[in-house]
Image (cartoon, rainbow, N blue to C red):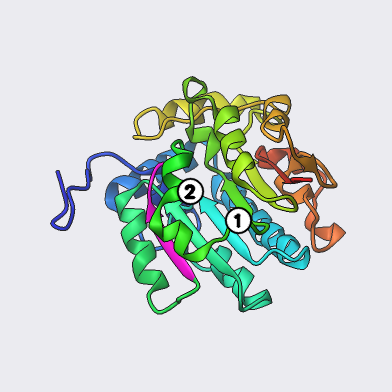
Amino acid sequence: MTDETGGVDLTRPSAARVYDYYLGGAHNFAVDREMAERAIGLWPDLPMIMQQNRAFLRRAVRFCVDAGIRQFLDLGSGIPTVGNVHEVAQDAAPDSRVVYVDNDPVAAAYSENILRGNDRAGVVQADLRRPDEVLSSPGVRALLDFDEPVAVMMVAVLHFVPDSDDPRAIVAEYREAMAPGSYLVLSHASQAGRPDQADSHQDLYQRTATPMTMRTREQVTGLFDGFEIVEPGVVFFPQWRPVSPEDVDDNPERFTGLAAVGRKA
């Protein structure tokens, strides 16, 4: 089945649109909502986990802005619903420039609509696993200058890159293009904290176009080769620079996802 605008397969859920549903967005289809509800049935904390991941993204963007970053490349961005990179960055520093990159045509189309009229934000439909194509695309080059520091965002996306595609090497290619003083912002699904839930969740994603590979804390840390990981290191979502100590409850491991920010010296 295809939609009337672009040959989108509506028989299979999309990770980007399922994530949009978890966040309370409206840019998703029945097949996405069905899968999300099945996942929530298996793991009721999922919407809360996704919201914590989005909260990490917002704190990390503000951290980067405070460090002087004014340009952001958001890889595997999904649909930029409320509180995404361009809103947070441009609220803190109106001259911030943001490019979203996603290979889902529906996510890219919705992004274009959302960003219409914002001349400091754009979207490129591309596959992050091909760094040369992403970095050389006109949409990226029009807004971002890689001779200056940039924040490269890989938030909740590398767990959709299988080991066979070598995510560590992919990150390294982006690192080589980044100027000193740039930052890597990364979060990743992990079995840490809730191994009892992880296997069924991975199995469910096998029916999507983007199967999931959860990774250990050691593997996630390895993605930061060539970067200096800033404090507090690789931690569960709520533990990364919370606004208030009260934002971290007694069981942060129940949020399972790991998050960190690294700086290229």
The residue positioned farthest toward the top in the image shown: 164
The numbered disc on residue 91 is: none
Whole-percent x, y for residue 45 in the image: 59, 45
Query: Which quarter of the figure has residue 195?
Result: top right
The rendered magenta stretch, by its main secondary structure, is classed as strand
Kindly state the secondary structure of the residue where label 1 is placed: helix
Give the position of the C terminus as an image quadrant.
top right
Identify the residue shown where x is 41% and y is 60%: 139
In the image, residue 14 sits, relative to residue 23, either above or below, namely above
Number of marks in the rendered image: 2
Identify the residue shown where x is 44% and y is 47%: 134
The numbered disc on residue 54 is: 1
Query: Which quarter of the figure has residue 84?
Result: bottom right
Q: What residue type is labelled 2?
A: Leu
Residues 207 and 220: in front is: 220
**Labels 2 and 1: the sequence-earlier one:** 1
Whole-percent x, y for residue 204 in the image: 42, 30
In the image, residue 7 sits, relative to residue 173, either above or below, namely below
Query: Which quarter of the figure has residue 34?
Result: top left
The magenta stretch is: 121-128
Q: In this view, does 257 lie to the left or right of 158?
A: right
In the image, residue 245 sits, relative to residue 38, either above or below, namely below
Q: What residue type is labelled 1?
A: Arg
Q: Is residue 202 left or right of residue 88?
A: left
Q: Mark 2 points at which residue?
A: 135
Whole-percent x, y for residue 154 in the image: 58, 45
Identify the residue shown where x is 36% and y is 44%: 14
Whole-percent x, y for residue 163 in the image: 52, 22
